[in-house]
């Protein structure tokens, strides 16, 4: 502290000049983060510590994969619950503490049209107020108002989308294929706790408002049938969806591509056998061709989901570009899916395919947060990808693996050399020795190249000694390079000569 204070004082000019006049010292400009940087410099990073999100209570620190999963899901559930309360009861959150005003963090205040009119119905449909929209529709019908087919279909779409109930605020909607995947995978359900989204699942009822409005419609078209079919598939009535599709065909109508996509997803629930599912999908695809309905990407995805052998997300990593994969990763993980180590490896492979290795640090943080940082296959994959790129000097060492393999040691050493941390890389060679592993000649050449760039003769001699201790064939070549390319002391020359003699023998 004394030395630092003297350095600061030396930067400040004396307030009294040689002739006695007062000299104002130069202004010292401090950055906005100067205090934070000074505080951060007083502590060191603990590479063995758990993720900071788990440090509120040491007793609650998760130790198993299941505990990591429950913790992450609980945190996400808390965020969604807070959003729900704010948007459901905005009148209790009108007092604003933020300066400056941040509109996106404040609840929306919406004034609805109160009189009975078509405009009021359109507004309630736009705001996704299911019960209010149905009440307004009933009032309009009782008043003798004739509603257009398009407006009635809009109301049917809303009712079928949310299962005749008001939607939960700011909670992502489940797609038909996600619901089908949950029902179709009994192995995942058995012996595992239910998600909150599963407890809130809405079941399709024959007496709901969608059926009531559909039955009293004076005119129906294929869109009217399609709304009910998609609603039945989404809310667990796939057999009724096929009955409704049969009625559509009997009325000489054609379905659109969205209706066919829903029916394809429903095949996974109405057919148990893999072959029967495929036969039904072929029938639907042939009917699409007969009705001149052009399939889209969602049609292809629906077929893959029904016929899948692995998880949803693993298939996505193989089939889609990295931007689509990241979009779903951010939306689904960990709220709807909790990736295992293999899922993260598939994600890393997608990064490698699209040459987006800059995203690896974020995935490493996520893997630590989900408790997968002790999985050797995942760790080796991350290290092998990181070893290809030049790293910064702040490369995170992380926790020590449970066991060392030759690949992991080689990858970590290459990363440290790319970050020009020669001393730390040298410590990795001692781990090679302690674990009875042998470094490759390629790695030793990388080591020598890095030492040569720093022109450190002593480190070069140490490298030769380490190579000789491993009895590597490259030792003589390294001795010759060091003798020719470095300025050595007499002691270093004598040591290299002794090593050369012992290696020849």
Image (cartoon, rainbow, N blue to C red):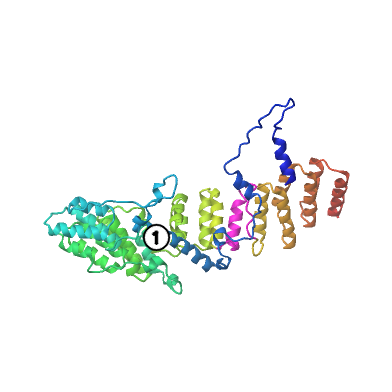
Q: Nearer the viewer, residue 175 or 414?
A: 175
Figure check: 277 above or below 223: below
Name the outermost residue toward the top. 19
Residue 425 in magenta? no
Give the residue at mark 1.
304
- Please state the horizontal and vertical placement of residue 250, each as a whole percent of the image: 18, 63
Q: Position of 453 compared to 79: left or right?
A: right
- Please state the horizontal and vertical placement of residue 322, each as a whole percent of the image: 47, 50
Q: Is residue 218 visible?
A: no
Q: Main secondary structure of the magenta part?
A: loop
Name the outermost residue toward the front. 20
Looking at the rendering, which quadrant does residue 301 occupy? Answer: bottom left
Decide: few, some or many residues near mark 1? Use Cα within 10 Å; few <14, some 14-19, many ≥20: some
Residue 382 in magenta? yes
Q: Is residue 329 visible?
A: yes
Q: Position of 237 compared to 151: left or right?
A: right
Stretch in magenta: 371-399
Position of the C terminus by quadrant = bottom right
Looking at the rendering, which quadrant does residue 246 occupy? Answer: bottom left
Figure check: 39 above or below 82: above
- Please state the horizontal and vertical placement of residue 230, each as a whole percent of the image: 28, 61
Looking at the rendering, which quadrant does residue 83 occupy? Answer: bottom left
Q: Nearer the viewer, residue 33 or 417?
A: 33
Figure check: 491 above or below 210: above
Tell me the residue at 61%/55% (across/down). 383
Name the outermost residue toward the left. 144
Count of numbered badges drawn on the protein = 1
- Please state the horizontal and vertical placement of residue 243, each as a whole percent of the image: 24, 67
Name the outermost residue toward the bottom. 191
Tell me the residue at 59%/52% (across/down). 385
Q: Secondary structure at mark 1?
A: helix
Q: Position of 38 compared to 209: left or right?
A: right
């Amino acid at each position: 502290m004394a030395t630092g204070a003297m350095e600061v004082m030396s930067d400040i000019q004396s307030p009294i000049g040689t002739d006695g006049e007062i000299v104002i010292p130069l202004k010292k400009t401090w950055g906005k983060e100067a205090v934070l940087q000074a505080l951060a410099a007083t502590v060191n990073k603990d590479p063995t510590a758990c993720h900071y999100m788990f440090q509120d209570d040491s007793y609650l620190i998760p130790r198993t994969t299941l505990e990591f999963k429950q913790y992450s899901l609980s945190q996400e559930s808390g965020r969604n619950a807070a959003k729900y309360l704010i948007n459901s009861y905005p009148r209790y959150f009108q007092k604003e503490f933020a300066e400056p005003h941040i509109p996106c963090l404040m609840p929306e205040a919406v004034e609805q049209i109160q009189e009975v009119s078509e405009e009021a119905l359109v507004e309630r449909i736009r705001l996704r107020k299911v019960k209010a929209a149905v009440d307004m529709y009933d009032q309009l019908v009782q008043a003798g108002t004739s509603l257009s087919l398009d407006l009635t279909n809009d109301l049917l779409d809303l009712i079928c989308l949310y299962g005749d109930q008001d939607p939960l605020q700011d909670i992502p909607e489940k797609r038909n294929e996600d619901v089908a995947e949950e029902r179709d995978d009994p192995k995942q359900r058995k012996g595992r706790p239910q998600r909150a989204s599963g407890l809130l699942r809405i079941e399709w009822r024959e007496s709901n408002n969608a059926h009531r409005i559909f039955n009293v419609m004076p005119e129906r078209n294929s869109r009217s049938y399609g709304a009910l079919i998609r609603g039945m598939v989404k809310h667990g009535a796939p057999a009724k969806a096929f009955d409704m599709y049969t009625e559509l065909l009997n009325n000489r109508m054609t379905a659109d591509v969205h209706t066919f996509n829903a029916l394809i997803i429903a095949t996974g629930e109405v057919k148990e056998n893999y072959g029967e599912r495929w036969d039904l999908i072929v029938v639907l695809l042939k009917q699409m061709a007969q009705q001149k309905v052009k399939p889209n990407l969602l049609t292809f995805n629906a077929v893959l989901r029904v016929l899948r052998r692995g998880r949803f997300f693993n298939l996505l990593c193989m089939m889609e570009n990295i931007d689509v994969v990241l979009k779903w990763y951010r939306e689904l993980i960990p709220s709807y899916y909790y990736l295992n180590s293999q899922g993260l490896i598939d994600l890393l492979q997608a990064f490698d395919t699209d040459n987006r290795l800059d995203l690896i640090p974020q995935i490493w943080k996520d893997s630590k947060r989900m408790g997968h940082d002790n999985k050797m296959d995942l760790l080796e994959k991350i290290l092998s990808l990181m070893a290809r790129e030049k790293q910064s000097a702040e490369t995170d060492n992380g926790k020590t693996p449970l066991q060392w393999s030759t690949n992991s040691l080689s990858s970590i050493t290459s990363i440290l050399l790319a970050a020009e941390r020669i001393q730390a890389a040298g410590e990795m060679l001692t781990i090679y020795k302690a674990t009875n592993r042998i470094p490759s000649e390629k790695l030793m050449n990388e080591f020598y190249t890095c030492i040569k760039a720093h022109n450190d003769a002593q480190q070069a001699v140490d490298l030769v000694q380490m190579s000789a201790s491993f009895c590597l064939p490259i030792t003589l070549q390294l001795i010759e390079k060091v003798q020719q390319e470095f300025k050595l002391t007499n002691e270093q020359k004598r040591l290299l000569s002794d090593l050369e003699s012992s290696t020849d023998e």
